[in-house]
Image (spheres, rainbow, N blue to C red):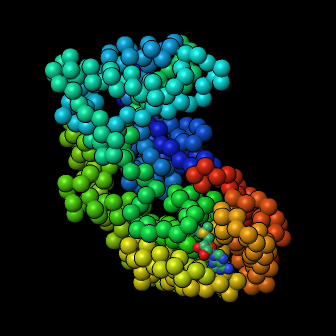
Amino acid sequence: MKKYSLEYFASCPMGLEELLSQEILAAGAKKAVQVRGGVQFEGEPEVALKVILHTRLASRVFKYLYTVDAIHEKDYYLEATEINWKELMNFEQTFRLTTVFGDLPRERDEFRNSQFVNLKLKDAIVDYFRHFDGTRPSVEKDFPDISFLARVERGSEKPYQITLMYDLCGDPLNQRGYRIAQTEAPVKENVAAGMLKLANWNPETEGLIDAMCGSGTFVIEAAMMAGNIPPSFLKVQKHLSNRGFKMWTFINYPWFTADRDLQEKFRKLIEEVVQMTDDGMKKLATMKGRIKGSDIDAYSVGVATDNVQKARMASLIPIEKKDALASVPNAEKTLFICNPPYGERLEHGEDERLRALYKGLGDHWKNHFKGHRAALFTGNLQMLKQVGLRASKKTILWNGDIECRLAQYDLY
Ligand SMILES: C[S@@+](CC[C@H](N)C(=O)[O-])C[C@H]1O[C@@H](n2cnc3c(N)ncnc32)[C@H](O)[C@@H]1O
């Protein structure tokens, strides 16, 4: 059995691992190793907290606790009762445990079912407390005090290993708190932030337009980047105004509650977020009109307007009802970023309409955005060809479980 102390894992949408590792090193990690769908890192506990508050790209941050070797799924129960669970939670706390299978051999009899491992692990926790305290902690599906993740993989010592982690976040970090309503097929907030970084958007030298803004994700993420406002700023605000409500699950964990020094460091990190938000909002006020959103659909315009307002940026980001093919550059250099519909509904005649839309975009850029840049995100590779322009760069990115492309164009 291996016990960890300063090791963490940040998960992210596939395709953003390299950019995430840069964010993590900037937060002060000693080491960051990219793996598929995330970054493993080492650092003092406050580095993990800093990542939670400042990452634009991670979905969640986990703290590694133990790795246990096993030959068969039945072995795990015994090994798990050896874990010092009292260090990880107390019996009055509710918990949730999720078991996932990583990369395992296809042909296997020994580990068949993640539900079975999950059950055995829960039994081990409950039996441990029953033995020491004569009472058992309860399982809670929706709002547990403690949230564990167990990951089953190929082992180094024995054929399998199970790694137990704390989920430090609770709600995913991409849920920033500004999306009070959403339109069909919104892009995830961290995927949108990742695209702005992949496109090397520089708010100091380039304006930004999302002319198919749907729920407004790109423009809000862009504004936070332009103002250097931490993406956690709304959660931090809620944390400060509502002390009873825990915005991140780590606040319940003995890892945090038993460490006064860490609590003090967290208080300072929170203060820093508040200061950066105030400074950032002031900076954004000087950049009015540099970031714009529009959409042809009145409902989407309403949703984006509500979300921009929730993000406290209503006076800074104009949202208009307009056809994308009527948009014009809003600065000397402009990045036109968009995520057109990509045929999620396959209604009669939609193919033709989409074809015309993608071709229309390419023509519009050629005629009205000379000297500017465009970036188009889509899950429909056939439609991408209709744009009819040569992309300077194409990047594979995943939005949820859909493989998509970000195509970038330099428009001469
Ligand atoms: C996939 S959604 C965009 C989602 C958005 N990125 C978000 O995160 O919520 C596509 C959007 O394109 C809009 N749209 C379709 N045709 C348009 C056109 N010709 N001009 C402007 N917007 C258009 C739709 O109304 C829809 O809101």
**Viewer-nearest residue: 54 or 305:** 305
Query: Which image quarter is the C terminus in?
Result: bottom right
**Viewer-nearest residue: 255 or 148:** 148
Q: Is residue 121 above or below residue 92?
A: above
The residue located at (75%, 75%) in the rendering is 353
Q: Position of residue 349 (x, y in %)?
A: 76, 72
Q: Is residue 180 above or below residue 365?
A: above
Query: Which image quarter is the N terminus in?
Result: top left
The residue located at (70%, 64%) in the rendering is 346
Q: Position of residue 389 (x, y in %)?
A: 82, 70
The residue located at (54%, 20%) in the rendering is 111
Which of the 4 quarters of the picture holds residue 43?
top left
Q: Position of residue 385 (x, y in %)?
A: 82, 65
Quadrant for ligand 1 reads bottom right
In the visual, does 382 lie left or right of 404?
right
In the visual, does 324 lie left or right of 185?
right
Which of the 4 quarters of the picture holds residue 125?
top left
**Viewer-nearest residue: 129 or 392:** 129
